[in-house]
Amino acid sequence: MNYPQLFLTTLPELIVVLGMFVALGFDYTKYKELDPQTRSNKVAALSTIALMLGLAGVVWQFLQVTDGSKTFSNSFNGQVVLTPLTLWFKGLIFVLALFVVQFAKTDVPNKHVSEYFGLILLSTLGMGFLITAQNLIMLFVSIELISLSLYGLTAFQTDKKFSVEAGIKYFTIGGVSSAFLLFGLSYLFGATNELSFEGITAAITSGAAPQNYVLIASAFLVVGLGFKIAAAPFHLWAPDTYQCGPVPVAAWVASGSKIASFFLLVQLFGPVLETSEQKETLIAGIVLVSVLSMVLGNIGALRQSCVKRLLAYSSIAHAGYILIGLVAANEDGSISVLFYAVIYSLATLGAFATIGIIDSRLGREAQIDDFNGTWKQNPGLSILFMIFILSLAGIPPLSGFFGKFYLFMAAIGSQPEIASWSEGFYWLVAVALLMSAVSLFYYVKVLKAFLVSADTPKLPSIQITKAEGAGLLLLAVLVVYLGIYPTGLVEFIAASLG
Amino acid sequence: MNLFNFTDSVGWLMWVPICPLIAGVFLALLKPSGRVSAFVAIAALAVSLILSLKAFAMTWGHEAQIETHNFTWMHIGGVDLEFGMVLNALTGSMLAMVSLIGLLIFIYSWSYMSHDDRMGRFFCYLSIFMVGMLGLVVANSLLLFFMFWEIVGLASYLLIGFWFQKPSAAAAAKKAFITTRIGDLGFLIGLLWAFKATGTFLLFDNGSGILETTQIAALAASENVMFGMNTAGAIALFLFIGAIGKSGQLPLHVWLPDAMEGPTPVSALIHAATMVAAGVFLVARAFPLFIADLAMLEVVAWFGAFTTLFAALVAVGQYDIKRILAYSTVSQLGLMMVGLGAGGLALKEGGISIGMFHLLTHAFFKALLFLGAGSIIHGCNDEQDVRLMGGVFSKMKISSIAYLAGTIALCAFPFTSGYFSKDQILLSAWTASGPIFWISAIASLLTAFYMTRQCCYVFLGKYRGKGHVHESSPIMTVPLVILAVFAVALGYVSEHFYHILDYLSGVHVHQHESIVVIISWIIALGGIGLGLLVYARAKLGIDETDPVKKVFPVPYRWLENRLYADEFYEATAFKLWDVLAILITVLEAIMNQLVDFVTVVVRNIGSFFLNTIDKRVIDEVSFDGTCSRIYNSSQINKLIQNGFLQGYLRLLTGGAVLIGILLIVFTR
């Protein structure tokens, strides 16, 4: 094994791990006597520095790979392959983690401050590895790293019964899903006799692998990964986790974890869907999951009065939308899935962070009624929240609109020979559009409370910290920017995939 | 698109408009105090100016070279919407002029607006205006050009109506916005037509842009598309309609004099240097389209000639110092159009030089005149009527000398900048067409005459207004002095030392005709002399009759009333609306009777539909029904999400089984 190469390949991760241990060490010794809030600020600062250094490492690797002066392809025995695309997404994960750390530091659930941030960093590493993984073993290990960290984070509010309950539910369902996933992976290995993605793809495309086994494996993978992206009917953990866990954790589950999972989904299913003779079957399965997610997610959100739970259902619905891109089963579809995953994560992270800020100032879970007339007291916060919500609802010119547009175009364009409304995926897109219309109802309900409700404001004027403000503003700028100029990112993804 | 590449491509040109944009957004969002806003706006524009000068330096000596940087903005359906920046002599010179004069006006406004408590907002609007103006200069796409053009329109609306508490200012802003919008519609049609005909919005694109030889040849090949013109000419005609609106040409000039209701720096910015020049710039930019059909060049020249004479006549009968300058601007813009049209007829591509040269010199001396007028108005306690001024010269030396420098440049006094540029226009008109030459010559004579008349009113005699006259602060006078130097020297220096005419169009321009030179001397000196003869010794004042009016009372009254252009619109367009309104009222009365009758018949049917079809079928069953059914269907969620883990796991496994069943069903 080439150790210097291995070192350089995992440099960002090593930095972050080191940073985590430094934070833990300081917290156990030097900061021991301080009050929780000060400790939280200090540990968060250390974590931020670690993540920034890690991000710098990723950027360095990205520059090296882009100009071709160095390749990291064969390190780790091919377990991890660094390409511009994977590095870009890994960088994005690190950036999102930076935001989450900023939002998390004002309201740490209990006195185990450094463990809280340590788990966030660990899950970041897991997501980074998942994106760069090119091997089934590596894939499973990273998924478990993410999942176990997130279970812990969800149950972190140990003084709250519901938080622990949500953690247990998440853990149990996650365990069952992992079993499905592992079963699927083992079938994939059995069918192709390969562990690396490259080998698997080659075996499937050449027809060497028995189609039926591949299909069975894919069906199990749909269940296992359906859990990760919170698609119906594997979504049942999501509302409880999002509502009862700490809000920054919910934001993290809804953004970082989603991006990593969708990236994996594209990587795993891309070749199967594009080449397999049995792709009709697999597509039927994905379509089922997609429609169920859109319908259950949107309808479930209609009656929620708790904003976090509402966003949880909306995230289930969004998983349904994104799967439409996968159904297209071509390169356009993959591009649109990745693009949507990015912009969805940005907007949902922003929305959750805003709710988190309001929750922590309010001292309890915010209901929609609590937002009445917030506009008057907190115009800045309201505008930012409006941007996130409208992007989620898919209103132009925000990026959510273009994301949906690309997804639907990919699905319709995947079967160019079909012209009639009754064939192809027109009906699927029609369902998606209908459900988007339904979704407007609950998004606008939240906005209405924010903007036009004439009652006297319930919320006091909210002071937000500089880090929170800067984070929210940056997220909003990104959401708007990707709406006005989506081509840059889309072309980058297209060039990297092709 | 790499915005941070400052070396090998021209993508960095985008930063010229982006700098004021950043300032504008900053001012709009953070609302700093007046002084800070002024500082931010001025600093941002200074950066733009530096970049503009770099662009200018890059084009100097490389006249024929066109550098572009294009990128895809959006990909929709099968269409690429491409944007881009272009750098050639036209861009370079225009950028340098706009940002330099803009910066001077910004500095001037700092002092001029210092007593206004909405100063921050004012600088925000100014910055947005510069975004549009600088943006359209660098744009290499008709669509992008149009977008910035509209930003200019919006910003000018906001600026003209800045003192919106004055009803006249609010009305003027609305008038400017709506009148130019009529022109913009023409522009929009033109750009869509160009897109349909060529499939691209790009002006220059390595040989396949709209303005490049292959496309022009293809466009010119189609004969008699509209009014006997070819496609290029037809597109050019619609673009020219846009230019007519923006540049205040007959018959869409009516907004320009009214727009003087805005603060004086705005008048200088909009009416001298930039906004009104945008129309002329559009014609210059799209000049290859105009050359492709000679009939179009004649249209441009004749429109210009009529405008220049009309506005020069009206200016003689005005008493408001800014209004005189406004009509003078209209007149000079007409002259620029003559330069472009006649220049194109006489010199082909060289026509760009003729029009643009006058645009550049005019920008400097007209900005100077407006800012000088602002200073004088300030000094005379906000009085704008020249009959209530007088004797200003001895009290406001710096402002007055600067103002006189602008005046002689506008009168085309030999060897000032206006002389050189106007001379070129007259020379090409002489070659192109006799009548246009004589019309332009008479207009130029009138220009010298009305400017002398104005100066006699303002500077000679005793002060006739209220209060005391006082000189303005140095922040206001320094820009005046700088502009005065440019107004006097720019023409000679640029033509004799630097051959600016060759630079502007990239082809060698040379025209000489001794008789024209003599005529233009006679015009300038004759006009001034005539003015002095009539006004220098006359008794002037609000109670006195104007000396010209004494001799020609009736025609002069027409001039005082601006040749009834506004009244003409009132009598025609407005009357037409009135007549239509009456007709509609009559029709409505008849219709009402009919409707009443039908109503009775229909009411019964209607109530049936109302109660049965509408309420039952549509509301209860269809729309409301569907909505509430969807809403109620979320009950199902309670069933699933019951909180029991066993149920969750059962459902998860059920889903897996469902997929398994699908697998069996679909696999054949």
Image (spheres, coloured by chain):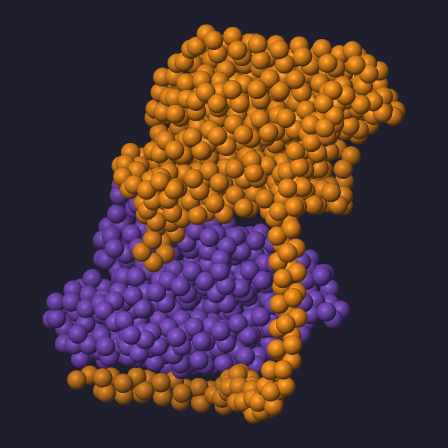
Chain colours: A purple, B orange
Residue B543 location, quadrant: top right
Position of the N terminus of chain B, as image quadrant, is top left
Q: Quick check: can you spot residue A258?
A: yes
Q: Where is residue B258 shown, x and y percent of the image?
A: 67, 37
Name the residue located 29 percent from the left edge and 53 percent from the top edge: A496
Residue A105 location, quadrant: bottom right
Name the residue located 53 percent from the left edge and 25 percent from the top edge: B335
Q: Compared to A11, does A401 lie above or below?
A: below
Name the residue located 75 percent from the left edge and 12 percent from the top edge: B536
Q: Compared to A359, does B273 lie above or below?
A: above
In the picture, measured across the screen, residue B37 lies left or right of residue A88, that is right
Seen from the viewer's position, the closer of residues A308 and B454 is B454
Seen from the viewer's position, the closer of residues A20 and B176 is B176
Seen from the viewer's position, the closer of residues B27 and B179 is B179
Q: Where is residue B306 shown, x and y percent of the image?
A: 54, 30
The furthest residue to the right: B467
Seen from the viewer's position, the closer of residues A345 and B32 is B32
Labels in figure, total: 0
In the picture, measured across the screen, residue B636 lies left or right of residue B124, that is left
Q: Where is residue B486 shown, x and y percent of the image?
A: 58, 16
Position of the C terminus of chain B, as image quadrant, is bottom left
Q: Quick check: can you spot residue B37?
A: no
Residue B397 location, quadrant: top right
Name the residue located 22 percent from the left edge and 57 percent from the top edge: A77
Q: Where is residue B32 shown, x and y percent of the image?
A: 69, 42
Q: Compared to B521, does B59 lie above or below?
A: below
